[in-house]
Amino acid sequence: MIGMVLAAGWGSRLAPLTDELPKTLLEVDGDRTILDVAIGNLRSVGLDEIVVVTGFRHDVLADRRPALERDHGVRIELLHNPKALEWNNCYSLWCAREHFARGVLMANGDTVHPASVEETLLAARGDGDLVIAVDQEHELADEEMKVQVSPEGLLTRITKQMDPAAAAGEYIGVTLIEPHAADALAAALQATFERDPQLYYEDGFQELADRGGRVRIAPIGVVDWVEVDDHADLARAREVACRC
């Protein structure tokens, strides 16, 4: 199994900090960046091969790669998404499809969370095609990526366009892809971005589930985490990162 970080986004709401820097390289704990936290989490569960999907300012990430490899004791492959500033992240994940058959533990490059999330996903492996990390503890609002779940713990719906009262929790941007699901997931992602290139990879997960795929949820318990979209999120991430 390998680790993967989706880090192609620009982060326009974090300007001017992201005028020349991908938001995954924003510092959240001293000189530790969001990407450092993500790679550190993957390394802590035994993964030493990491694929980072890049887009905006790929050159900056390429310059940082030697230091990241040295600091974390990992080997990093950078995979450039040439459409990162045009299309949404469904295409970013599809760009990495050749790695799915190795088994992938994937994290969004703008999410700060502790390694207990990765540990939870690995412990939840079983008969699923994917395992997704879900926060069932905090209060939901309109912007969260919300999920509905069957009595068997399988995903039935994932979308931001859901009444929070009808949701079972929020997907936090960390997923385990089982090797046997590689072709089915790649096909579902492709069908999704071909339908609309502005769709999210979570819409691809929905497509997979609609095709009969088994997307299992893993509740993460009471965990401090944050998705960094704006300056307020970044301030919160700096509080969370110092405890990760």
Image (cartoon, helix red, strand yellow):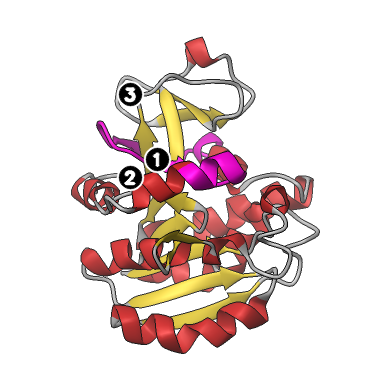
Instruction: Say what secondary structure mark 3 lies in.
Output: loop
Q: Which of 39 and 19 is in front in this view?
A: 19
Observer-side mark, 3 or 1, equals 3
What's the CA distance linking mark 2 and mark 3? 23 Å
Q: Is residue 234 magenta?
A: yes
Instruction: Say what secondary structure mark 1 lies in.
Output: loop
Lower position in the chain sequence, tag 2 or tag 3:
2
What's the CA distance linking mark 1 and mark 2? 5 Å
Q: Mark 1 points at which residue?
A: 214
Q: Which of 20 and 115 is in front in this view?
A: 20
Quadrant containing the N terminus in the rendered view:
bottom left
Q: Quadrant of residue 85?
A: bottom right
Q: Mark 2 points at which residue?
A: 128
Lower position in the chain sequence, tag 1 or tag 2:
2
At horizontal 56% and vertical 86% (from top left) the residue drawn is 63
Q: Looking at the image, do the residues carrying marks 1 and 2 touch, with CB atoms under 8 Å apart?
A: yes
Query: Residue 214 location, x and y as percent?
Result: 40, 40
Lower position in the chain sequence, tag 3 or tag 1:
3
Instruction: Say what secondary structure mark 2 lies in.
Output: loop
Q: Mark 1 belongs to which amino acid?
A: Arg
Query: Residue 37 location, x and y as percent?
Result: 37, 62
Query: Residue 96 location, x and y as percent?
Result: 55, 69
At horizontal 45% and vertical 36% (from top left) the residue drawn is 171
Q: Mark 3 belongs to which amino acid?
A: Glu
> Magenta region: which residues?
209-235
Q: Name the residue under label 3.
A: 137
Q: Nearer the viewer, residue 124 or 179?
A: 124
